[in-house]
Each structure stands twice: as C-alpha cells, then as structure tokens.
Image (spheres, grey):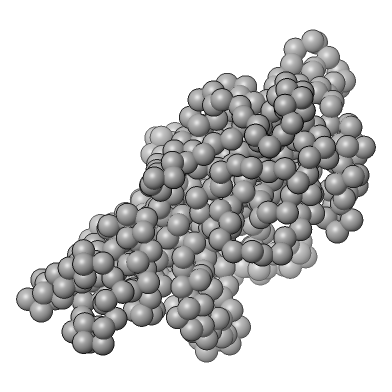
Amino acid sequence: MMHSSSTYIASKVRLILSGVLEIKGNECLKRLLYLLDYGSSANNFGSANIPKTVVELVCLICYSGLPEYQKNVTRGDGIRTLVTSIRRCLSNGVCTSRRSFALHFYHNVFYERTCCWMTAEEWEGKDALLFYSLWGLAELVQHSSDTDHSHIKSNLIKTVQEVLDNVSAPGPRWLAANILSYFGVYGFPNKHDKGFGRALEDKEHTDLQLLFANGESVSVHKIILAVQCPSLLPPEQFPQSAKTTDNFLVKDVPRKCCPMLRKEVRFSARVDQQALLKLLDYVYFGYVEAGEDLARKLKTLAKSCNMQPLYLMLCRKIPQWGTPIPSSDFTDALGPLGFQFADIILEAEETEKMPWACSFCSLLLPHMHAHKFILQSRCKYLQALFLSGMQERLPKVLPSRVENHLRNKYPIVRFSRSPLNRLPFMPFILFYSSFHQHLAWQFLFPAIRKASKVPVSWEALIKLVRLIYSRKLPDPPFGCLWDNMDTKERLYELKPYVEVYWLAEFWILEDVQEACFTTIISCLDSDRQLALEVMKLAAGFSLWKLAEVAADYMAPIYHKLRDSGVLEQLDELLIELVRDASVRLSQGSGGFPHL
C-alpha cells in the first residue's frame, strides 16, 4: 500500500506507519538490519529461513519509504547486506515462491491450474527472496548518495548484471534495470543477447539514411525501426493495408509501396543528434549508457517517440506490478507490418497438397515473407550463406528472350541441396533481390516457379523462422490438449521438432538443438509409444544420439515389441540399438544415459 499508484493511499499509509514507529522506530531498524545481515550469511542462508527473511525485507522496504528513516537505512550497511543476499540467491539455487508461504494464496482457485490453461511466469518470479532483495536494494539506491555505496559499487553493478543475464522473470529484471539506471545504464544489457548492435556499427544491409541538420547521417534498417520505434519512420512508410491482411491484394502492392523508394529521412535542427543516436543504441542494443545531461535530452525524445519502457527507466521509477519487459521478439515483422520490408521468400518442402492462399502475393505454395537482415543477424550459417556470392539462376522453362531480359532486371538466387543426402548445404529457396524486383517477378510470371525446397516441412519451417525472430521455440500442445490426442496426432505435433533439431545441427544453432531435444524428451516422457516413430525419424535424419535415446525408452518393453513383430519395421541397426539398451537395463546400467 505504501507503493500504491494512488497518492492518497500511499501518503495515508506512510502517515500511519510513521506514527506507529515514532517511539522505537530507530531501535527496530537497527535490529532489523542485524537480522538481515545474519540471515544472508553463508551459515544461515537456507530454505528454512527464507519466509522469515522475506518478511524482514518487506519491513526494510517500508522503512526506506519513510523520509525520516532513509538516511539511517542507507548508512546502516543495508546495501551491502542486500547485495550479499542477491548473490546468495543467484548461486544457491534454492527458490521459494511467494505463494508457498503467503497465507492468502492457500487454496486460492485463481492461482490454481485449470484444465489445459497455464499462466505465464509470475511477474515476481519463482524466488521471492531474490525479488524482495532487489526491491529493497532499488529503494535503498534511490535514497542514497554516491558516498553511501562507493565502496561496493563495482560489486553491486556486477551482481545486478548477473540478474539480467540469468533471470527471466519480468519483476526481478525490471528492478535490476531500475538499479542500473542510477549508474548511467538504461535498459536491459544481456551478455547472451547483444541485439542488432553489431549491424548498426557495421552498417550491414542498411536501407535508410537519417540525415541531421549539420549534414551528418547514420544508416539504419527500416524493419528494425518499424518494429521497435515506428515513430522514427515517416507515416507514408506504413500503407493503410499494413494494418490488415484481409483486403491486401497483390495488384494493390506497387501503388501502395511507391513511398518505399524513399531512402532518407531529414531531421530539423530541433532534434538533438546525440540524443537520437543514443535512442538508436537502445533500439539496436537493448540498452544505452548516458550521463545526466544527455539522459534528460533522451528522456524528452523517448517520450515523443512513445518509447515507454525507456522513458520509465530514464525517470528512474520502479515499474508498476505486472509491467511487461520490452521484448526482442520480431515475429510482428512476419505479418503485414514487416511485409513492406521483406526481401526474401522461404518455401517449405512440399509434403502433401494443402490449400494455400497468401495475403501478400500470388504464390500458391506454403511460404513465408522474411528479412535477410534478421535471419543472418541471428544465424551465422545464414550470414555466411548470404555472403557467399551464390550464382544467380533462372528457371529453364522461360523463353530465352525473356530469360535474358529478366537476368539483368529480376534476379532470383536459388540455393539447392544435394539429392544424394540430407545435408542442407543450400537449405532454402531464397528468392531475393529488391522488393520491387520480387513483385515484378510475381506479376509477370506468377505460375513459373522451379526451385529446390527447404528440406523441412511447412510446420517445421514455421517453428524455425519464429524461433529465429523471437529467440523462443514455440511450445507443443500441453495439458488436456495433449492428453486427448492419439499417438498419430502426437507424432504430427512432434515431428517438426525433430526436423528443426536436425537442421539446427548444420546451422550451428546449439541453443536451438538443446531446446528441441528437451521438447522431444518431454514428449517421450508423456508417451513412450512415440519412441518407435521417433527412432524412425531420427534414423532418417542420421540423428543417432536421438535414436539411442528413443531406444532407451523402448528398452523396458523390448521383449514385448520383439514378440509382437513391431520391431520388424526397423532396420537391423536400429533393432540392435534397442536390444543393447534392453541389455543395459537388465544389467542395471541403464537409466537413460543420454538425458
């Protein structure tokens, strides 16, 4: 209630609490700081003391909200104690959620899982002690001076940075970002995700020049601005049709996309160049470093550009409960918003005939309009592929005169894979050139398409591209949706993850491989009958590690499978894998060694 958005409620609670603490407030504060210091020590840090410590942290947060006690809190070594507590939380691995000890959460139906509906991660995260330690530290840093924390400044910043690197819950990340704002860092720096910062520095594939009044300029990418900061793009860059796909016809594209020829935007002298460059740093890197004077200018610009998360951090306000983290998810670019800037078409391997109609073009095969810049920024394999200077080809069915005409004006780059194996040396169809060249190709010869396919199914391509754009692998169905599926339906949902797992090996996407492997294992845990089909898929893709894991799941019922003749569906090599897994299990040395 002290941190209520209602000024009346917050002031009233502070007044009441000040009256209660008037007699023994300082004495209780000293005792409280001693208990927190004692609880954060290595010998006393454990799950048994966490509920008590959380209550003490809440008391400290209340003290820090009262002006008459703020100096005593900051000078009482409270900052060092909280930094130590945060480091213990990060290294200890013992997590106690708020609902595990808060009485009002017991038997609360609103916090129980209902059927297949699952909530996202709670805003405060799974570790209540970490959350309240960060909240207390944010309050103390806010009311302290440089001299109060100069002796532990480097340790404090390093600890808070570890929170941003290793914690995914929005609440702790917001509090960590709020703390860093007092040290001139605004945003969410993360060693695991550098955003598109390198592309801004190297000026790779830029398609827009921002010109300042003094004649200087900076090169940027329209698709990045369109998703992260559309206010920097002129309104004509967003045709009315970009808001919906229902009435977006191919014949309307050339007229509506004429403004896309614009390659530069000029700013007046009223736009502060340094502030705008810092704003671009935030857009590309996810954070920005700025001194006090520049931060004030940047705050004005962030407000004008409707960059609310950045504006909130520049104001150094602790966010309201439930405020989402600014996302690096670019999946919106795969829709109408990003189609205006698409320069690549990805087609899936055609497995079976399916009705298809694209809202943006006339191609009748399943495909996605994507962006080379985003693909290569998040996949080194694709970066090397795009920069390898592949020979441009055209379909041989074209008349020679038309072919010669289009070879110069409307090039198509095709990457094929070897038919002798499944090595994705050239894994996609990549039709690319400029946006208008691609459109001209569609209008002149909409029925002529001869090229290699992406060596994965349409379902796998969707998951792969969305993973690249969002850095998060889409989850399979869960709960009762999964429980009510038969084995055939479950296999249909699981197969794309096997395909992406295979492709990720060659694209050197180790984190993607790990995510797919974990998903596959969780599906096998819930239905061992999938193991036989997974083994077939794994063998087809030469994924022998996955085949061995599937064999481990089949080992307990090996004799039943052998007697029923089910194993006859497999090659002798695969049968041998299952037999070996069964022998290891019978000898007591089994137990899924690959998990």
Residue plotted at (39% across, 45% down): 420
Please name whichever residue, 181 or 286, is drawn nearer the observer in this view of the structure.
Answer: 286
Find residue 376 and report its horizontal and vertical position in percent.
55, 35
Residue plotted at (39% across, 79% down): 526
Q: Which residue lies furthest to the left in this view?
A: 587
Q: Quadrant of residue 27?
A: bottom left
Q: Is residue 309 left or right of residue 574?
A: right
Find residue 515 and report its horizontal and vertical position in percent.
42, 57
Q: Is residue 462 left or right of residue 426?
A: right
Residue plotted at (25% across, 70% down): 551
Position of residue 269 relative to residue 236, above or below, is above
- Name the quadrant of the C terminus: bottom left
Position of residue 558 relative to residue 363, above or below, is below
Position of residue 253 relative to residue 318, above or below, is above
Q: Quadrant of residue 314?
A: top right
Q: Is residue 166 visible to the viewer in this orientation of the structure?
A: no
Q: Is residue 443 visible to the viewer in this orientation of the structure?
A: yes
Please name whichever residue, 125 or 75, is drawn nearer the observer in this view of the structure.
Answer: 125
Residue plotted at (81% across, 22% down): 264
Position of residue 375 relative to residue 422, above or below, is above
Find residue 134 and report its horizontal and vertical position in percent.
49, 54
- Name the quadrant of the N terminus: bottom right
